[in-house]
């Protein structure tokens, strides 16, 4: 038997785990939360509603509260991440989207799910919770639950104008990380609707969009011979390493190297 929980952590009442297992399994059991898992590697054999099925890498499994389930792992190692979402969280978001009765949490489609957006949303939330990203974690939870509820976020013209209003605010406040609550009030939406509508409209959530704006402005400052340390301070980065890592992740090089290459005139890095 080999079953190892590599990590188990809880953030704001939502538990997450990352498990690696082989030659083992979980007997029939149930949970009182929604349990959603992303299979990272290997093949998991599951038992659900009297039937056996196989979960492959890149697939998601979802179980409603109270559902009897079981799992088995053969000799090939299986690694997966799981998030346990309390019924109250799903009910609150479903109520905001007018999807639910006043007394019951929704019954979601369960079993094996092939949905790359759901897989990615689950992975991002578990990562943000493990790294304690704070406000980013709340945003990732909203995106994850939005995918679980599977309702289209269709923008009306008035909603589109609200998104543009938020974008303009983000452009004008590059040195301070915004709060979702404040952005939602600005748009006249709930945080749930803001994150979903903004992501569908722009391709990324508002906090990540704001980071992109900051980094592109940083590049402009570096072109104008502003020292990387001064650029980091002007844009509100809490330390130099945070700025360097964020810049390198998006631009593929460090601020110092980018600045030196641009100033050299050798055009080793293309400047749009």
Image (cartoon, grey):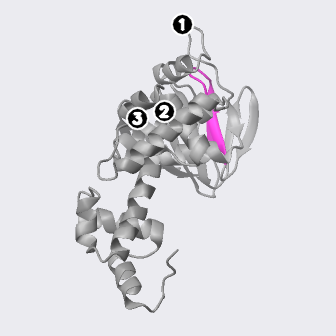
Where 201 falls versus 6 (above or below)? above
Determine which of the numbered discs, if any, sits on residue 183 in the image.
3
Q: Position of residue 266 (x, y in %)?
A: 45, 92
- Marked residue nearer the N-terminal end (1 or 3): 1
Q: Position of residue 249 (x, y in %)?
A: 44, 66
Q: Can residue 81 be spotted in the picture?
A: yes
Q: Is residue 64 magenta?
A: yes
Category of crowding for the residue at label 3, using alpha-carbon neighbours closer than 10 angstroms: few (below 14), some (14–19), many (at least 20): many
Determine which of the numbered discs, if any, sits on residue 103 in the image.
1
Find the magenta span and give its range.
59-71
Where 214 falls versus 249 (above or below)? above
User: Do tag 1 and tag 2 residues touch (Cβ < 8 Å)?
Assistant: no
Task: Name which quarter of the figure residue 151 lies in.
Answer: top right
User: Do tag 3 and tag 2 residues touch (Cβ < 8 Å)?
Assistant: no
Task: Name which quarter of the figure residue 178 lies in.
Answer: top left
Cα–Cα span, label 1 and label 3: 30 Å
| Tag in front: 1 or 3 | 3
Q: Please, what secondary structure does the residue beneath circle 1 have? A: loop
């Amino acid at each position: 038997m080999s079953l190892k929980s590599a990590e188990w952590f809880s953030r704001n009442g939502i538990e997450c785990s990352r498990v690696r297992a082989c030659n083992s399994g979980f007997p029939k059991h149930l949970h009182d939360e929604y349990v959603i898992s992303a299979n990272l590697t290997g093949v998991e054999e599951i038992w659900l509603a009297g039937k056996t099925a196989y979960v492959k890498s890149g697939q998601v499994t979802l179980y409603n509260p109270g559902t009897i389930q079981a799992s088995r792992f053969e000799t090939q190692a299986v690694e997966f991440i799981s998030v346990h979402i309390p019924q109250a969280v799903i009910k609150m978001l479903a109520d905001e989207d007018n999807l639910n009765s006043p007394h019951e949490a929704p019954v979601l489609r369960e079993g094996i799910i092939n949905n790359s957006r759901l897989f990615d949303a689950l992975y991002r939330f578990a990562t943000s919770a493990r790294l304690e990203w704070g406000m980013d974690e709340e945003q990732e939870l909203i995106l994850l639950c939005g995918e679980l509820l599977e309702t289209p976020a269709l923008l009306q013209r008035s909603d589109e104008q609200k998104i543009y209003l938020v974008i303009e605010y983000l452009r004008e406040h590059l040195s301070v990380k915004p709060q979702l609550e404040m952005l939602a009030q600005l748009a006249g939406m709930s945080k749930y609707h803001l994150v979903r509508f903004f992501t569908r409209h722009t391709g990324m959530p508002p906090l990540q969009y704001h980071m992109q704006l900051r980094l592109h402005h940083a590049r402009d400052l570096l072109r104008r011979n502003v020292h990387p340390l001064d650029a980091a301070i002007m844009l509100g980065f809490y330390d130099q390493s945070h700025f360097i890592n964020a810049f390198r992740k998006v631009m593929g090089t460090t601020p110092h190297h980018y600045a030196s290459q641009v100033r050299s005139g050798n055009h080793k890095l293309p400047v749009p």
